[in-house]
Amino acid sequence: VHAEAAKAAVEQQLSAPRPALEESWHQLPSKTSLPVNGIQIRVCSWNLQGRPIDSKDDLKALLCPAGKAADVYVIGIQELVELGAVSLLKSKDGDEHRQIDLEKMLEDRLADSGQDYFRLCSFGMVGLSLLVYVKESLAANIGQADCDRVKTGIDG
């Protein structure tokens, strides 16, 4: 019974109308060539254990180990809020204030790298957050981006 309910919830969310993304995201990528040396993608995961983001947290080591910035960042955050019954019922999309603080801190550290990045996607879901940043110089190579989540479980 639980598997059928989860499958029905997923199908319902996939068939629901999606909010419009930026107009350029629906276009096909440019035919411009990518960097000769390829693209460096850094995938990071950080468990905050429910504590607020602190300005003392050293994101430079996470984002630019050995001082080297990547072309694309995919950053997953776990336990952006304490995972208690209240936070689970209070907000299905996460804590907006903590999400904004997280984005600002990450974007400040990326700016410190001397490179220009844009946020391709960012969203939260209870205690989880997913953010993707791409170098501005690669913007013409990105198209048809779609970032979303599928909720299952309580009120899935």
Image: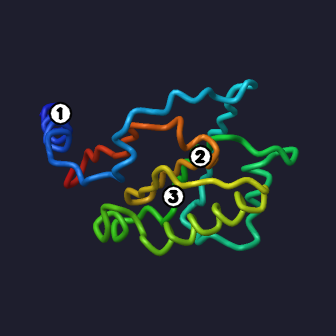
Q: Which mark is residue 138?
A: none
Find disc 2 in the rendering and name its residue.
134
* Kind of residue at badge 2: Val
* Kind of residue at badge 3: Glu
Find disc 3 in the rendering and name its residue.
79
Using residue 66 as the reference point, say whether residue 37 is left or right of it. left
Q: Position of residue 126 (x, y in %)?
A: 38, 60
Residues at marks 3 and 2 touching, judged by CB atoms closer than 8 Å: no
**Mark closer to the chain start, 1 or 3:** 1
Distance from the alpha carbon under mark 2 to that under mark 1: 33 Å
Label 3 environment density (alpha carbons within 10 Å; few <14, some 14–19, many ≥20): some
**Mark closer to the chain start, 2 or 1:** 1
Label 1 environment density (alpha carbons within 10 Å; few <14, some 14–19, many ≥20): few
Element under disc 3: loop
Q: Residue at x 77, y 62 (%)?
A: 112
Q: Position of residue 113 (x, y in %)?
A: 78, 55
Q: Is residue 141 above or below residue 46?
A: above
Q: Nearer the viewer, residue 39 or 83?
A: 39
Q: Is residue 34 above or below residue 68?
A: above
Q: In the image, which is nearer the foreground, mark 2 or mark 1?
A: 2
* Kind of residue at badge 1: Lys
Q: Residue at x 55, y 44 (%)?
A: 139
